[in-house]
Structures are given as structure tokens and as C-alpha cells.
């Protein structure tokens, strides 16, 4: 094969050129054997990663283009079968140089799995954030309801406390009144009060007896012809001044003077006038006859 034919063929790999020995035969072509030690896969893959995508897309088209481009050079002293075998050998060497162990495919699958896991983690994080937001809203609502419930409980407690205070005050007042009434009921009457009451009762009984005596001794009045004018006093008495007869009832007479009013019966003394001799009716008017004169009834 001429040097020009070798110059037109594509290089077996990318990067710096390395010396290689190519074996051409009619048998199945062998891949290119490097004379230098194989570089680490991670370093080689890292360097070839930018070209992997473009190379995988253009691999088929590049093979056809290389065939048409190198066809004239391959026909110079080399048969068509040898040229095709050389192209296939170069293609196999290129494929082995790109991913000889399949690690790139495993890395790509692992990357896809990692991407899927990242997407799932992101989705879970979003769901967790939404759950936290919902929990915060529920906690806020529950806190508000609890605060409102506590306010209601405080108001009820205050009302109950006020009612208890009112009830205690009412009980104390009632107890004090009961004690006071009990003391009044159980307290014995004083001797002086008993004597005064007894004296008043005796005086009233005496007055009642005197009324009955006056009513029994008083003659039935005789109808007399009606006369007009003022009542003339008896020959032996005069009209008592500054005294007035207000009313006569049940044998008693109510007389009124400057010193006050007095309820008198026959025989009772009147201050400044003397004893009552009689209570009688003269000329359709009641009069009280005393030692010093007659007390007339005035309107």
C-alpha cells in the first residue's frame, strides 16, 4: 500500500498520534495494536465524552463518506475487498477505543438512574414541603381555635367566680339577719317595759269601764224644738276659751287646746280646765262640761 493511501484513511482514534502497525490480509481483519500501554478508562472516557454523542450520530454517515472518499486511493494497487476490510478494521478499532469494556454504557444507564432518582427526590421534597405547609396551616387554625376556647373558658370562670361571690355575700347577709331576728325573739322583755305596758293596759281598761258607766248613766235625750243661734252656757258656767271639742265617740271626747289634744271621759282631768263633769248634747251639739266651764264643739 502506498503512503498516499495511508494518508487518506481515517485515524484510529482521537488525541495525539501514536505509532501503530496495521496488518492487511485477505482473512478477517484484526484491530489495530497500540505500541504504548493502555491509558486508564476513566481518563480516556473523560477525554472522549464530548465526542461520544456526535460520533454515535455520525458513525453510519461517516463510514459511507469515508468509503467514497478513499475509493480512488484504494484502487491504486489494492483490490476493492482489501479496501473494505481496511475500513471495517478502522471502524472496529474506533468502536473499541470509544467503549471497549461497556463501562460508558453502564455509566450512561447509571446516570439515567441517578437522574430519575433526583427527579423522584425532588418530587418527594415538593410533597414534603406541601405537607409541611398544610400542617402549619392546620396548626395555626388549631391554635386559633384553642385560643378562642381558652378565652371562653376564662370568661365562664370569671362569671362563675362572680356568682360565687354574690352567693357568699347573700348568705352572709341572710345569716346576719337570721341571727338578729333570733336574738330579738329570744331576748326576754325588760321589766320596765312590762310595767309600762301593764300600766297602759290598765289605763285603757279604766277608760273602757268609765265609758260603759257614762253610757249606762246617761239619760236618753228628749227631742227638743230646734233653735238657732249659738249655745248659751249654763248659768253656773262659762265657755272655756282656747279649747275646742273635736269629736265625741263611745262615751269619749276629743278636746284640743294649746297644749295638744286629749281623749277624755267623765272624771278625767284636763290641764288648766279641771275635771270633766259630763259629756252631753245640747241643742244638737256636743259639749264637755268641766269645773271651769263648757268646752264647745266648733267646726
Image (tube, rainbow, N blue to C red):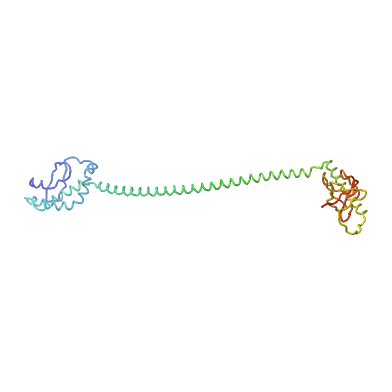
Residue 162: x %, y % from top left: 61, 45
Residue 212: x %, y % from top left: 90, 52
Tell me where residue 47 sits by quadrant.
Answer: top left
Taking the view exactly as shown, the residue that stands out farthest to the left is: 77
Q: Nearer the viewer, residue 297 or 26?
A: 297
277 left or right of 71? right
Residue 24: x %, y % from top left: 11, 48
Q: Nearer the viewer, residue 30 or 92?
A: 92
Q: Nearer the viewer, residue 44 or 264?
A: 264
Residue 264: x %, y % from top left: 87, 48
Taking the view exactly as shown, the residue that stands out farthest to the front is: 229
Q: Nearer the viewer, residue 198 or 275?
A: 275
Count numbered badges in the picture.
0
Taking the view exactly as shown, the residue that stands out farthest to the top is: 36
240 left or right of 102? right
Amino acid at each position: 500500500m502506498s503512503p498516499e493511501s495511508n494518508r487518506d484513511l481515517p485515524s484510529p482514534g482521537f488525541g495525539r498520534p501514536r505509532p501503530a502497525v496495521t496488518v492487511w490480509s485477505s482473512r478477517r481483519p484484526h484491530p489495530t495494536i497500540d505500541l504504548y500501554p493502555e491509558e486508564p478508562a476513566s481518563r480516556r472516557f473523560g477525554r472522549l465524552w464530548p465526542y461520544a454523542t456526535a460520533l454515535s450520530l455520525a458513525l453510519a454517515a461517516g463510514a459511507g463518506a469515508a468509503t467514497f472518499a478513499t475509493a480512488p486511493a484504494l484502487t491504486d494497487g489494492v483490490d476493492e475487498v482489501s479496501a473494505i476490510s481496511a475500513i471495517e478494521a478502522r471502524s472496529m478499532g474506533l468502536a473499541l477505543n470509544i467503549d471497549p469494556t461497556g463501562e460508558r454504557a453502564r455509566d450512561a444507564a447509571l446516570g439515567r438512574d441517578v437522574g430519575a432518582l433526583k427527579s423522584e427526590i425532588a418530587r418527594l421534597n415538593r410533597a414534603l414541603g406541601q405537607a409541611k405547609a398544610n400542617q402549619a396551616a392546620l396548626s395555626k387554625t388549631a391554635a386559633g381555635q384553642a385560643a378562642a376556647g381558652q378565652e371562653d373558658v376564662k370568661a365562664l370562670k370569671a362569671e362563675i367566680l362572680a356568682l360565687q361571690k354574690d352567693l357568699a355575700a347573700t348568705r352572709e347577709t341572710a345569716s346576719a339577719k337570721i341571727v338578729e331576728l333570733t336574738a330579738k325573739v329570744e331576748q326576754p322583755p325588760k321589766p320596765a317595759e312590762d310595767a309600762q305596758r301593764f300600766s297602759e293596759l290598765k289605763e285603757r281598761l279604766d277608760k273602757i269601764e268609765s265609758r260603759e258607766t257614762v253610757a249606762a248613766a246617761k239619760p236618753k235625750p228628749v227631742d227638743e224644738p230646734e233653735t238657732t243661734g249659738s249655745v248659751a252656757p249654763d248659768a253656773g258656767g262659762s265657755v272655756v276659751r282656747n279649747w275646742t271639742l273635736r269629736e265625741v265617740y263611745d262615751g269619749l271626747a276629743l278636746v284640743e287646746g294649746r297644749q295638744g289634744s286629749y281623749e277624755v271621759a267623765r272624771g278625767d282631768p284636763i290641764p288648766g280646765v279641771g275635771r270633766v263633769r259630763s259629756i252631753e248634747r245640747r241643742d244638737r251639739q256636743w259639749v264637755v262640761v268641766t269645773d271651769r266651764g263648757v268646752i264647745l264643739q266648733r267646726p
